[in-house]
Amino acid sequence: GAVVSQHPSWVICKSGTSVKIECRSLDFQATTMFWYRQFPKQSLMLMATSNEGSKATYEQGVEKDKFLINHASLTLSTLTVTSAHPEDSSFYICSAHPIAGAYEQYFGPGTRLTVT
Amino acid sequence: AQSVTQLGSHVSVSEGALVLLRCNYSSSVPPYLFWYVQYPNQGLQLLLKYTSAATLVKGINGFEAEFKKSETSFHLTKPSAHMSDAAEYFCAVSGSSGDKLTFGTGTRLAVRP
């Protein structure tokens, strides 16, 4: 149980285009989903916290107009990187916190974004 | 506010040796503490968690950690390292259930044959 999927697992796009990454909790409902960014050989940096049906809360320094987050249902959150540039290339990981019972977050497998 | 310090960005042990990965935390409220493992190009897998119950926490794959409030520590140990334990390990803290996690900088564990 407690499986989180991400799609796509990797994507290559051209500079200036937009990319959407999906995060789904497959066997539970999530009150909250989190989006992290991880540079090579570094730790995870929280980008934003997303709650179903409300606006995401972005961490300081994260451009909300560039990284659009939509949490349309209790099992789906999406991150759209708009007008991507090479410096947006990174590993993006989502996590989900179940509605009931668990203290921990469950993490997706990550999405490798490369902007050329 | 919470923060986590992981001492040692790289740790190397021989197969069969004790694994000790250090984590110290700072929290203005009673913390929830977690250890996650990450294999290359993958997401994070929960090893174990402390949520104010037993101070000695046992996790998966033979790992355990002890919460020591007086030392503000939550070190991860395993009695005997296996080659498959080679990975990146992250300690994380939150202030409440479902709250955002603050991660340490990670420790890369290498296991020598």
Image: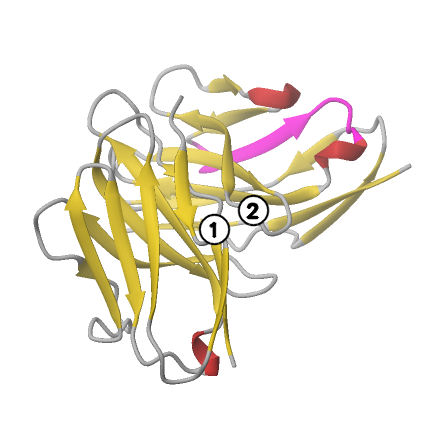
Q: Residue furthest top?
A: B54
Report if residue B71 is visible in the image.
no
The residue at the point 52 percent across, 25 percent down is B66
The residue at the point 35 percent across, 43 percent down is A95
Q: What is the quadrant of the C terminus of chain B in the image? A: top right
Q: Residue furthest left?
A: A54
Determine the chain carrying the residue at label 2. B
In this orientation, which residue lies closer to the viewer: A104 or B77? A104
Are circles 1 and 2 on residues that touch, CB within 8 Å?
A: yes
Q: Do callouts 1 and 2 point to residues on the same chain?
A: no
Question: What colour scheme governs how the chains and residues are painted in the rendered image of this protein?
Answer: secondary structure
In the image, taking residue B45 as reference, residue A22 lies left or right, namely: left
In the image, taking residue A68 as reference, residue A47 lies left or right, namely: right
Which amino acid lies under the numbered mark 2 shown in the image of this protein? Gln
Report crowding for label 1: few under 14, some 14 to 19, many 20 or more residues within 10 A (C-alpha): many
The residue at which mark 1 appears reads as A110
The residue at which mark 2 appears reads as B42
SS class of the residue under badge 2?
loop
Identify the disc placed on residue B3: none
Q: Which residues are magenta?
A: B70-82
